[in-house]
Image (cartoon, grey):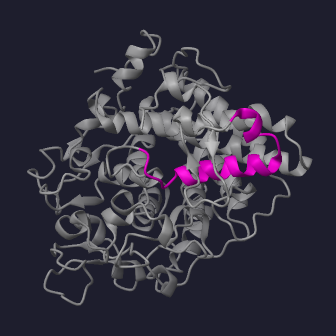
Amino acid sequence: MKKIFNRTVLGLAIIVAASSCNKEYLETNPTNQVSTADAFSSTQNAWAALNGIHRTLYMQIYGSQPQGGQSGNKIYMDMMGEDMVLNTTSNSGFRSEYQWTTHRVPTSTVNEYHYSFYYMIIANANMILENIDNAAGPQADKNFIKGQALAYRAWSYFQMVQLFGERYVANAPNSGLGVPLVLKPTTAKTPRNTVAEVYAQINKDLDEAITNLQGYNRATDKSQFNINVAKGFKARVALTQQNWADAIKFAQEARSGFTLMTATQYQAGFNDYSNPEWMWGSRMTSDQTNYFYSFFAYISSNYASTATRTSPKSIFSVLYNKITNTDVRKKLWEPNVSNTAFPIPAGGTRYPYISNKFRSTDASQPTGDFVYMRAAEMYLIEAEAQARSGNNAAAATALYNLVVTRDPSYTLSTKLNGDLIEEIMIQRRIELWGEGFRFYDLKRTNSPLDRTGGNHTATNANNTLQVPAGDKRWQFLIPQEEIIVSNGVVTQNPL
């Protein structure tokens, strides 16, 4: 497929998503496009276009197998942190990202993927927003479609600005360059906007999304955005901007109506979006599997791909040792290689601290639903924001309400200030392991990468065991082809 950079993504990419076809996805090749008039002639067609965006989150788009939509980003972000361990370099999947090399090469496919994937979603959200008002159909449907398109655009820009821009600092100018803001279908060369401008647009889009999604009932289809998910995005953004009051408010509102999973559900493989705690996820069926592009082909404990057999993912032993023995989450990893009862893929290799958190629903193929947002995250956001704003009691309560469901022996924390924040961050690392948050968390909190003292090895990490906070390596480089095609309108980050 043609590479999708600023020059192509900003053009008239139309989503093809016929309900009678299993391959409901966005296609950028002109021969497979439908006309704009047909795609948005009715709200029914616009719903299909929106579903096309949903489908891109786990579909095969790029030539590199780890880049299977958003599922690829999830593993990239954790492999670049300290809590996921690469046990061997014999398999190339995520090896260079673990070693912190490819995101600093302007011609790398990793940068191209993170840049073009989100711009593809933005371009198609823009197409929906440009045309939905003239579609035939109920006004309520137009509002709901518009709300989801706005939320997708905001989420995509939020993902990108954290990668390609400098970290956001509250009460600072944030005048460093982020990414180009493109808000309408256009082929014009667009320069990068500042980090402050990108965040302002993200919040504007999310505020409008929340307004448009009022009253929308998605029933059981958690691939659709409802007002809870939009508020979950607001909570994430507010946390990153150190806007503690909004982080608390929206985290509380976002999780309303969702219950935390039971201990039994926690050990069920994280593959079913009917889980009561899941707020947003993708439904994967056996006839829609992406095979070796799938999330489960790289991280599941039961599907036998080359990556899972030869290079299973482990938890950082330092973090594992912080989990209490009465915590159900401790059962998701096994420190002892002699425990043959702990599941591994057929023909797989055992390493210390390997994971059983994620399992394919069918051991013969890498299938399972993908989780992108859970109510647990909202408790953690509230707890962190309360603690960072000095409300120790409220922070401890929010943390307790989550952790006691994982560890029945957990008691209300009596820690204060920095010690309490540290406890919250440890719980966040345990709870969200493998779900794609660690790189973002380290960057937003201006924390260093520190892989020392545990089961990381200098050889596998190519000696990248530590990266100081604020180092230029915390910024991904802009794809070189984007700079060339834009004739230098889009500029590069510090090399």
Q: Residue at x 25, y 77 (%)?
A: 345
Q: Nearer the viewer, residue 433 or 309?
A: 309
Q: Which residue lies furthest to the front in this view?
A: 31
Q: In which quarter of the image is the C terminus?
A: top left
Q: Residue at x 49, y 36 (%)?
A: 160
**For residue 184, above or below residue 131:** above
Q: Residue furthest right?
A: 138
Residue 100 seen by the camera: yes
Residue 243 seen by the camera: no
Q: Which residue lies furthest to the left in this view?
A: 459
* Image side of residue 270 versus residue 402, left or right: left
Residue 181 screen position, x and y as percent:
59, 24
Residue 12 screen position, x and y as percent:
62, 28
Residue 61 screen position, x and y as percent:
44, 46
Quarter of image, res 306: bottom left
Q: Is residue 146 magenta?
A: no
Q: Is residue 41 magenta?
A: yes
Quarter of image, res 303: bottom left
Question: Majority secondary structure of the magenta segment?
Answer: helix
Start-end of magenta stretch:
35-61
Q: Which residue is drawn at 71% across and 58% down?
A: 228
Quarter of image, res 311: bottom left
Q: Nearer the viewer, residue 157 or 315?
A: 157
